[in-house]
Image (cartoon, coloured by chain):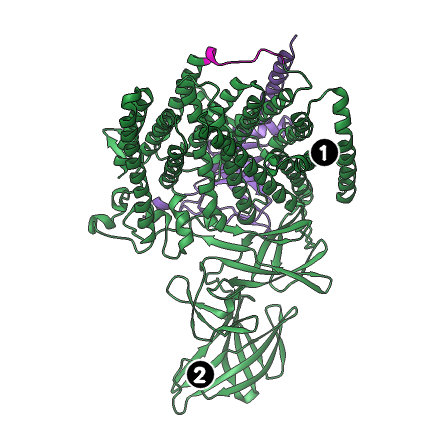
């Protein structure tokens, strides 16, 4: 199937090429043939998708891909994530999107079909070659997702039984077990895939001598691409915020940068393309930008997948030996693009007139330049490992490493560029819709300026922003919001909603800027250690301990809150909220447990004692943390943690959402929940009614009691079973434990009680009737605990709201530009 | 001069500033020996050191001391030149720390005999190699 897809894509490329060149008579038959070839390719690609999914869905662990990315415990929607967790799967996803986009293009174009599809099919040929998995001599082309486990692994089991199929797969990376991760990669890849469309139109336009006309059909797709890519990036950011524990939504990780940079360039190209449509300038700039954005996507792919990033990134793939192939892919299109543009460069119309400072072209051009510089500033340090690799391949030695404090390094530039952009969008929009000179500009800007200043002053006072650079950001953000809102209302009054895309997106930008400033600049760690322990290690005292140790049931103060850790929980299928592990006894089977007590929630009993319950992802534990202000209970958070055998402790934060801020908490370390190493036996002889200490806990031995029956044990005539009732106090919690002592015939049996939360094991060791005393054997471990970090992130909702607004702006613009294209196409002016 | 040229010069100037700052902010890979020399010379820039955790003859990791409140720890690391160094990290022990094949610490010498890591990157054994 893969080979069929590969061959058919080449055939498609060739036949579309012929179709484009063919004369009128032969055109129809070439077109028919090309379409057939393309549909064969499409079907083959869909079949590849279906087969791979089938392998994962049916747990066919004889296949390496299913074995390494899926497991039986996974719910269906995460199987979709398994699909693209691996590198091969993500290529297939990309191929899939290209095919979908290709079908759309075939049906929406008339004269563009030929040249555009040539580029499309060529790209497909390269992508499909990545999953070919053909080995010719020493040359490996592509890495197939359909190889069998026994062909990959050298495990001895395969020499004994070549047909061995593992029981279960190794599962999906727990970090990816999140609903956002199910939709983030497809969105991002659709964004990547769609950058091909403007590029294909451009190449087609240049090759067929339609140097200007390509802009119209390409523009809606460029905006579409920026829309989808932007959405994908923000979904990733949101995912990082809700599941990763680095405490934010953006980490300047190379992989993040690799998607951010093409997006910046895409946005820049949208602006120059629009300028061109209005005033016939900036055509060459647009051409360069469109090529750059497509090549940057390929470069990003290369960075992420060639293994060159190595240790510098959290989510780079391992090297599959494809780096050479990826490099060829990258260089091929870079070369073709430069070649074709260079060949036609002198034919491309330019406007000689100098742009005036009062023209919108000038301002937009500055804006696009700023975007370009932003991209440059990010891509340069991201490529440090590439520079090292290049220097080393020429025999040199380079020990350059990425900046140690990435956040500070990138932010100091990006923020100022973003401020510049915000001001430019404010001013630029006025130029856009009106003819301007000095006086008109002054008049038009005065009102928004004054309003923005008032708004900024309010924000600064209320938000207590006293840092000069932050003040500038607030002013710039407020200005762009007010200025664009002014334009928005004027447009809405005068004409239709269709034209408002730009101002909406720009208002979004202003909100994002302010949201980022507050949530990052004023993020505050509130879990600073207040345990009162003093360290006599000079400098260490000055370090902020950003984590707190919470012993179970013991309150600790964190800023205005008192916080208490209450124990470990699981999620159970069908039961709202969480269920304490104290009520669950796990069985041999995955995700299954027996209820040790009735499981109730909101007054309803979901499971009776002794029933089997189904747990949602058994590895995940949720730690109940209660927040109090003084004595008043406020809320409870359940940050998640999963001790993963291959990846260590995987933690997902839980946040309390307030309108103006988030309280963000995550677990940094947890107790070891395997059978603990008990300390030496301690013995206590106590009479009923007496109080004594077990560990640090005050304990009352209430009574001894003779039992008639013991659960799980068949008591015979003459057997005696005695139970001791102990009441243990731990802070505000009282716990009853009941160890049992049995005499059956000549034998003595003891049923001890283990309390993991308190870290104690108590056994009724003996009864001394003469002294009316019971002897208890106690083993200690340690109380349950979690180590946690908590931060306050103010105004983060402004950031999310701004993002959504910006995306709406893009959507409106797509609608408008696509509508334009359709109208012109139907007039035959495509 | 045309405005276009002024703009061009401005862009080039900013680009150069960007490149210079990158060179200035870029960290470097060092060994403990060179890192200590840097610290003695008053250069407290954060640097990367690549190495492994110290292991005893039977292959078990030794030298990890967890702080009393479990929120920080010390460990012994051996860099690629074989130099042994005590490192402090102001975060709880990462759960897979013992099993890491290679660690990269980013930080600097705060005291003559103690390297303080601001960040630790770990390379862990690939799951396929181990389980199959």
- Most distant residue in the top direction: B1
Measuring from the top left, give residue B49's x and y in whole percent. Answer: 52, 33
Q: What secondary structure is found at the residue carrying circle 1?
A: helix
Measuring from the top left, give residue A539's x and y in whole percent. Answer: 67, 41
Asked whether, in this view, residue A719 is left or right of residue B36, the answer is left
* Residue A347 lies in the magenta-colored region: yes
The numbered disc on residue A46 is none
User: Is the residue B94 above or below the residue A739 in the image?
Assistant: above
Measuring from the top left, give residue A295's x and y in whole percent. Answer: 45, 26
Tell me which label, 2 or 1, sits earlier in the chain: 1
Q: Colour of chain A?
A: green
Subunit of mark 1?
A
Magenta region: which residues?
A345-354
Give me the residue at 59% from left, 48% from top: B72
Crowding at mark 2 (Cα within 10 Å: few <14, some 14-19, many 20+): few
The CA span between labels 2 and 1 is 76 Å
Do marks 2 and 1 share a chain?
A: yes
User: Is the residue A743 above or below the residue A269 in the image?
Assistant: below
Q: Chain B is drawn in which colour?
A: purple
Residue B61 visible to an observer of this rendering: no
Subunit of mark 2?
A
Asked whether, in this view, residue B104 is left or right of residue A485, the answer is left
Which residue position is annotated with label 1? A479
Asked whether, in this view, residue A814 is left or right of residue A720, the answer is right
Q: Quadrant of the N terminus of chain A?
A: top left
Residue A588 visible to an observer of this rendering: yes
Which residue position is annotated with label 2? A710
Give me the residue at 49% from left, 21% from top: A287
User: Is the residue A794 above or below the residue A456 in the image?
Assistant: below
Which residue is at the front of the view, A41 or B30?
A41
């Amino acid at each position: 199937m893969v080979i069929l897809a590969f061959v058919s894509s080449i055939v498609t490329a060739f036949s579309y090429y012929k179709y484009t060149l063919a004369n009128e008579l032969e055109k129809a038959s070439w077109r028919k043939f090309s379409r057939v070839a393309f549909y064969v390719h499409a079907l083959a690609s869909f079949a590849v998708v279906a087969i791979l999914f089938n392998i994962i869905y049916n747990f066919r662990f004889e296949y390496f891909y299913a074995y390494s990315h899926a497991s039986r415990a996974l719910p269906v929607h995460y199987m979709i994530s398994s699909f693209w967790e691996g590198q091969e799967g993500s290529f297939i996803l990309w191929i899939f999107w290209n095919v979908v986009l290709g079908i759309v293009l075939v049906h929406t174009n008339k004269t563009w079909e030929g040249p555009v599809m040539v580029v499309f099919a060529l790209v497909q040929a390269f992508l499909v070659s990545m999953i070919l998995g053909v080995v010719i001599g020493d040359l490996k082309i592509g890495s197939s997702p359909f190889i069998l486990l026994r062909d990959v692994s050298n495990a001895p089991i395969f020499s004994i039984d070549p047909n061995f199929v593992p029981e279960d797969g190794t599962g999906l990376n727990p970090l990816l077990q999140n609903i956002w991760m199910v939709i983030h990669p497809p969105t991002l890849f659709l964004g990547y895939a769609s950058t091909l469309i403007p590029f294909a139109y451009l190449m087609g336009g240049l090759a067929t001598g339609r140097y200007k006309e390509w802009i119209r059909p390409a523009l809606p797709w460029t905006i579409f691409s920026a829309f989808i890519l932007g959405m994908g990036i923000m979904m990733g950011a949101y995912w990082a915020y809700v599941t990763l524990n680095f405490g934010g939504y953006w980490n300047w990780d190379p992989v993040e940068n690799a998607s951010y940079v093409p997006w910046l360039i895409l946005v820049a190209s949208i602006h120059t393309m629009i300028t061109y449509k209005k005033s016939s300038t900036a055509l060459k700039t647009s051409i360069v930008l469109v090529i750059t954005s497509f090549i940057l996507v390929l470069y990003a792919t290369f960075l992420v997948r060639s293994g060159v990033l190595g240790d510098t990134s959290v989510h780079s793939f391992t090297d599959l030996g494809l780096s050479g192939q990826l490099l060829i892919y990258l260089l091929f299109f870079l070369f073709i693009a430069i070649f074709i543009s260079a060949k036609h460069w002198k034919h491309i119309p330019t406007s000689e007139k100098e742009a005036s400072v009062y023209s919108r072209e000038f301002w937009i051009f500055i804006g696009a330049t700023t975007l370009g510089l932003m991209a440059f500033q990010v891509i340069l340090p991201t490529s440090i490992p590439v520079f090292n690799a290049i220097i080393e391949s020429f025999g040199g030695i380079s020990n350059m490493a990425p900046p140690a404090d990435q956040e500070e390094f990138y932010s100091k530039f990006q923020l100022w560029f973003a401020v510049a952009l915000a001001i430019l969008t404010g001013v630029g929009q006025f130029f856009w819709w009106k003819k301007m000179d000095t006086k008109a500009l002054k008049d038009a800007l005065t009102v928004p300026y004054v309003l923005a200043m008032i708004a900024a002053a309010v924000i600064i006072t209320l938000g207590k922003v006293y840092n000069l650079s932050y003040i500038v950001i607030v002013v710039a953000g407020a200005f762009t919001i007010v200025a664009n809102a002014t334009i928005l209302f004027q447009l809405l009054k005068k004409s239709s909603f269709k034209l408002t895309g730009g101002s909406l997106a720009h208002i979004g930008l202003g909100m994002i800027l302010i949201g980022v400033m507050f949530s990052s600049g004023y993020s505050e760690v509130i879990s600073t250690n207040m345990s009162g322990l003093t360290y006599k290690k000079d400098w260490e005292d000055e370090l902020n301990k950003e984590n707190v140790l919470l012993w179970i049931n013991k309150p600790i103060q964190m800023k205005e809150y008192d916080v208490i850790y209450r124990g470990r929980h699981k999620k159970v299928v069908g039961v709202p909220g969480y269920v304490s592990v104290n009520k669950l006894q796990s069985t041999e089977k995955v995700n299954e447990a027996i209820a040790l007590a009735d499981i109730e929630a909101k007054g309803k009993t979901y499971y009776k004692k002794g029933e089997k319950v189904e747990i949602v992802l058994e590895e995940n534990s949720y730690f109940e943390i209660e927040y109090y202000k003084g004595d008043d209970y406020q809320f409870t958070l359940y940050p998640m943690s999963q001790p993963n055998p291959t990846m260590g402790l995987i933690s997902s934060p839980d946040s309390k959402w307030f309108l103006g801020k988030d309280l963000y908490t995550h677990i940094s370390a947890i107790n070891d929940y395997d059978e603990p190493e008990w300390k030496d036996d301690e013995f206590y002889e106590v009479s009923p009614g007496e109080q004594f200490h077990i560990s640090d806990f005050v304990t009352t031995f209430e009574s001894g009691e003779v039992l008639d029956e013991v659960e799980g044990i068949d008591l015979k005539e003459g057997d005696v079973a005695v139970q001791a009732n102990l009441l243990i106090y731990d802070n505000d919690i009282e716990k009853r434990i009941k160890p049992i002592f049995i005499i059956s015939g000549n034998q003595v049996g003891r049923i001890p009680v283990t309390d993991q939360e308190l870290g104690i094991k108590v056994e009724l060791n003996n009864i001394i009737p003469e002294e009316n005393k019971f002897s208890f054997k106690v083993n200690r471990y340690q109380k349950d605990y979690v180590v946690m970090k908590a931060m306050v992130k103010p105004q983060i909702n402004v950031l999310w709201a701004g993002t959504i607004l910006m995306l709406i702006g893009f959507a409106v613009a797509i609608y408008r530009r696509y509508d334009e294209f359709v109208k012109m196409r139907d007039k035959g002016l495509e | 001069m045309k405005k276009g040229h002024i703009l061009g010069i401005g862009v080039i100037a900013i680009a150069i500033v960007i490149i210079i700052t990158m060179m200035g902010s870029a960290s470097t890979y060092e060994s403990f020996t060179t890192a200590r020399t840097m610290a003695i010379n008053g250069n407290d820039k954060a640097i990367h050191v690549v190495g492994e955790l110290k292991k005893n003859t039977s292959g078990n990791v030794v030298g990890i001391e967890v702080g009393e409140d479990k929120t920080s720890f010390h460990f012994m690391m051996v860099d690629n030149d074989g130099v042994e160094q005590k490192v402090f990290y102001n975060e709880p022990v990462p759960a897979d720390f013992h099993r890491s094949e290679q660690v990269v610490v980013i930080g600097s010498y705060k005291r003559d005999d103690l390297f303080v890591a601001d960040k630790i990157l770990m390379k862990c054994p690939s799951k396929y190699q181990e389980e199959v």
